[in-house]
Image (spheres, coloured by chain):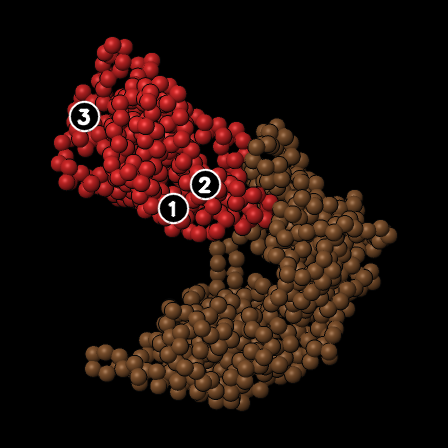
Chain colours: A red, B brown
Amino acid sequence: MKRMLKHRVFWPVVALVALILVNTISRPSFLRITIQDGQLYGSLVEILRNSAPLMLVALGMTIVIATRGIDLSVGALMAVSGAVALTIIDASPNPEAPETLVLAVGAGVLVTLILGVWNGFLVSVLGIQPIIATLVLMLAGRGIALLITGGFITTVNSAPYKFMSQGYLFGLPFAFYVSMAAVVIVVLIQRRTALGVLTEAVGINPEASRLAGVRSRGIIWGAYAASGLLAGFAGILYSSNIMAADANAAGNLIELDAILAVVLGGTSLMGGKFTIAGTVIGVFTIQTLKSTIVFLGVPSPVSPVFMAAVVILVVAVQSRLVRDAATRLLRRIRSTGTKATTEVAS
Amino acid sequence: MHVDTDVAPVIEMRGITIQFPGVKALDTVDFTLRGGEVHCLMGENGAGKSTLIKALTGVYPIDGGSIVVAGQPRIFRTTADAQDAGISTVYQEVNLCTNLSVGENVMLGHEVRRGGGIDWRATHREAARHLQNLGVTLDTRSGLFSHSIAIQQLIAISRAMVTDSTVLILDEPTSSLDRSEVEQLFGVIRDLRDRGVAILFVTHFLDQVYEISDRITVLRNGALVGEYAATELPRNELIARMIGRELEDLTEISSSATRAIARGGAPVFSAEGIGKKGVLEPADIDVYAGEVVGIAGLLGSGRTELVRLMYGADRPDSGRVEVHGKAARITTPRHAIDHRIVFSSEDRRAEGIVGDLTVAENIVLGIQARRGWLRRVRRSEQDAVVAEYMTALGVRPADPDRPVRLLSGGNQQKVLLARWLATAPELIILDEPTRGIDVGAKADIQRKVAELSAKGLSVIFISSEIEEVIRLAQRITVMRDRRKIGELESAGLDVDDVIDFIAHEGQESVA
């Protein structure tokens, strides 16, 4: 029990379970899952499906934050990859062909990978503060996307492209498999190789790591490149969902949700120790919260306030200060209670 | 003590005690500062100099003792309390606003007011007057950033004098100044002294201590050693009092110093004229297989600077380096590590351990960094390496999964030593590996150094404790004022010989 309490993802999981409970109590159908034509339907399935883009972005953000950095450009990069992919499909004589799909997706993520490399170059080679370095593409990225689409919202028809976000495989949304595959690959790369521990070392103490011979430049550079690549895939999923490349709406403010997911999951913005499992929980928490807002019928102008209130609550529960204060308060109540009884007894 | 007590003290600190978690930073220390004197506070790192200054400037509350300023007992809760009592401080890192003008900096918080606003013309006139008092003529409307550090120091001093301070504390003001700038600063200090200001001066440069100070107070390990008139305390006496004599039961190691070293072939490492402008004058150093070369000198003498340049932690701008007789280029730590040279920094916490990682992760970090991220050290291999070195060095507690930040300083040092020894180096540079750790751990580390060097490992060993250097090293490189001033064979040397050498060697040629 004590071990469980001390585990890093314990409190994030508590927050997620509490949120699901609130939903279930207010609307018992929340947990209901129905099967139609061999496919699962229900609120929980929708949460799995809709969380995919945020999951990809948050994975990259976790690694970047572990190096003491931050990547604000992810939302804009999503717009870029969507624009590249849809422009290629749009121009293709054969939009339904699998080759077109591979080319479109490949080109989309290649471009964002390059932009991620650019971010990494600014941070690790030129030594620009991450928040400023990635602000450049956060602002310019949507411009690049608009340039690619010629200023229009490109819309296409392509069944295979649509499948990525809206299709089902073995009863579950395909997008969910994409996000889970990314989680597994990132975990394998970080934990099976030494990349994870070296990333943490660089994030915890950059100077000590440098003197220990860690090639911190490459590690930091790689983190931004990975973040760019993952944001590219997120942009593909987003554009596949609406079958349009909307340079302004794609990934709008997702960088903030991603940062929030990382923090909710228990990874510190100070860098260092990170937990992918925590980030996964954090993403599900945010996505559940968004569904909650819809379920509870919170009017949309008020929804940011509602979201903020819940986030404050969740973060407060995780704060050591608040937790310690609560423990002390409990102890005091208990001890005054026993004191009162002993006084009565004497 | 031969201290002239004619002048009434401006500051009397009596029985000052400051307790930090687990350690007494200051233990019943007395300190007296009189008007019209320059008083140097001396002591090695960790002696309690800065703690005493922080007690006097209201940064730290005192746990015991009393502070009397101009006859009035005072309790300083904040730095503002100390400033109200007429105590001003100029720090090593100039704490002025570089984006404001000279005049704004001098008068900040004391601007001349008229009506509801500030009379800028009068404010600048006042600023110019205060600067003029120190013999400095400047355009007060020029930006502070456009002036050198030396001028900024003078501006900081005149800012302190705006409040009619009776006490001026100068904390290492000269560390980034060149010779002529120091002269200018000293001129101002003498002038202020003659006007009756009491000046407390902290520096690591011995020559400057004797040049400027009237009186010297020496601290060691948080306790007062004594107060002396500068003319009555010869240099070697001063150094001996700063360093102290620790007699430890370490006789078994003493054979290390007399071990014969074959210096026939090419040295494992040699550097000729390695230096960096403003950091270290070009110096030569070499070390042979199985040799322990000690570096002696006071803090700030350039010993850390020298080894950092050797390791590529800082980039040297002069000099030639050879490894095993072949020219080598070492400008980053990676280059050094590729040549099997490793370095353990004196700043364990900031530059050594990776606090949140476990003991085991910290130990294999050196090997892992060498291999790169793709070739992960296998769990079984890690366990074997960690177990071997934790036992060999006696790391306590023997729990490889504990975050290293929870270990004591001595055990963290052992973890760092393990990290480097596990990479099978040919030369290991240890900068103050025994500082601030308990006697037991100290002996463990010394024994390990003696044992490994006897097996052929080359070691460069820096320590403030000269006895330790004499005991371990066969040769000693001596540093002073960021210069190498000579080299000694340690066989037959005692501490006094080394102190004498530090104090006097080459002094005439400098003066």
Q: Chain of mark 2?
A: A
Q: Which mark is residue A25?
A: 3
- Please determine whether, in this image, residue A157 is positioned above or below residue B199: above
Whether marks 3 and 2 lie on the same chain: yes
Nearer mark to the viewer, of 3 and 2: 2
Q: Image check: B83 left or right of A154?
A: right
Whether marks 1 and 2 lie on the same chain: yes
Residue to which mark 2 is pinned: A117
User: Toward the viewer: A188 or B142?
Assistant: B142
User: Toward the viewer: A49 or B425?
Assistant: A49
Residue to which mark 1 is pinned: A134
Q: How far apart are labels 1 and 2 at the CA level?
A: 11 Å
Q: How far apart are labels 3 and 2 at the CA level?
A: 47 Å
Under mark 3, the amino acid is: Ile
Nearer mark to the viewer, of 1 and 2: 2
- Secondary structure, mark 1, is helix
Q: Dot 1 surroundings within 10 Å: few (below 14), some, or many (20 or more)? A: many
Q: Is residue B507 visible?
A: yes
Give the quadrant of the N terminus of chain A: top left
